[in-house]
Image (tube, rainbow, N blue to C red):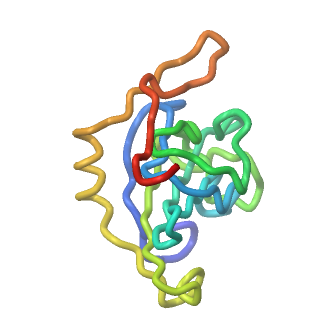
Amino acid sequence: TYGFARKHLGHDLMGSLGTPIVAVEGGRVEAMGWNRYGGWRVGIRSHDSKRYYYYAHLQKDRPFAPGLKEGDTVQAGQVIGFMGRTGYSTKENVNNIESVHLHFGIQLIFDESQKECNSEIWIDAYPIVRLLNRHRSSVARQPDGTCQRVYAYKDLDRE
């Protein structure tokens, strides 16, 4: 609880240290860096700006995909970071969480006034996680150590 009770706005997906994390939906990297609760984290806003995806507790020392930065456009299935156990500290790059996992949350945003306030709408992502588990993005480590999709992605709704 990091010292107090608070609502858990997402799902914790257990995994192995360094497991590649891929974007659920394409969009723009809106937030990236250290957060005292989520540790190393990435926030991606969908292309239509109605959904915000939060990926937290990324790996210490090498949390993000090489070259990824705020403002970048990412595609669904693109590697954005690596699973870890960072967070619960005001000091950056600290492993304060016992189990390696990804905290994954989905926020619906119908109006910008709903962002970062008491009227945020965070949905139950578990049914979506189950669907995505049946349709995983194939990722492979490249000779240079980076991780990339195995199959090219083309969004037929976007040019």
Question: Residue 94's spot in the image, x, y percent?
Answer: 69, 47
* Pick the front one: 39 or 111: 111
Q: Taking 72 as reference, is 4 above or below it?
A: below
Say which of 88 and 135 sits in front: 135
| Residue shown at the point (39%, 27%) measured from the top left | 138
Query: Can you name the residue that lies furthest to the top here?
Result: 143
In the current view of this chain or complex, which residue is farthest to the front?
Answer: 159
Image location of residue 45, percent across then percent down: 55, 63
Residue at horizontal 38 percent and vertical 34 percent from the top: 137
Q: Is 67 drawn above or below residue 42 in the view shown?
A: above
Q: Nearer the viewer, residue 145 or 91?
A: 145
Please state the total of marks drawn on the protein image: 0
Q: Which residue is drawn at 48% across and 83% down?
A: 120
Q: Position of residue 52 (x, y in %)?
A: 50, 66
Residue at 65% in and 40% down: 64
Residue 109 location in percent, x, y? 48, 78
Q: In this view, does 61 lie to the left or right of 118?
A: right
